[in-house]
Amino acid sequence: GAADFMAKPFAIEELEARLGALVRRSQGRTRAQLQYASLAYDGESHAFTLGGRLLPLTPREHAALSALLVRAGMPVGKAHLFGKVFPHDSDAGPDAIEQVLHRVRRKLAGSDVRIVTVRGLGYMLETVAAADTAGAKLEPGDEPGH
């Protein structure tokens, strides 16, 4: 009754992808669709769109944005992102993820989605409207309705 087989050693990313496919098949869905504000990911075409337009990404940028989108609104650790973006045998240094995120941030500029640094926790995908609301502070006497 086995549905799949993997020989050792295998990459965790491969295991995650196969488990995701099994879950989708068991639920009768063959197409994964993720959406966060105007950012959307189509699992069938493996493409990101931003505001309905195709978002051109390198494979590393794609991996980083995928990891952030899956946990949108929650911090993702730098080490976790590094593991998703760079192969285990990569010569990249631990700060290389910052370069990848810098490029993704530029591609998201001007949209309603952005990547923020959460000091001590990692990085997070958030909506610009949510960030503006969280950053707004009411002074005494400025309660809504006054």
Image: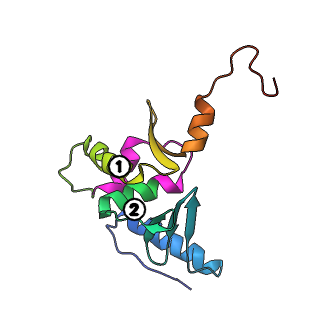
Mark 1 and mark 2: Cα distance apart in space? 29 Å
Q: Tell me where residue 135 sits by quadrant.
A: top right
N-terminal label among 1 and 2: 2
At x 52%, y 64%, the residue is: 40
- What color scheme is it? rainbow
**Residue 106 disc label:** 1
Q: Position of residue 7 (x, y in %)?
A: 35, 74
Disc 1 element: helix
**Residue 12 disc label:** 2
Q: Residue furthest front?
A: 146
Decide which of 9, 93 is in the foreground and name it: 93
Type of amino acid under label 2: Ile
Q: Is residue 76 visible?
A: no
Q: Is residue 1 above or below residue 83?
A: below
Mark 1 is surrounded, within 10 Å at the Cα level, by few (under 14), some (14 to 19) or many (20 or more) other residues, namely few
Q: Is residue 109 visible?
A: yes
Decide which of 3, 87 is in the foreground and name it: 87
Mark 2 is surrounded, within 10 Å at the Cα level, by few (under 14), some (14 to 19) or many (20 or more) other residues, namely few
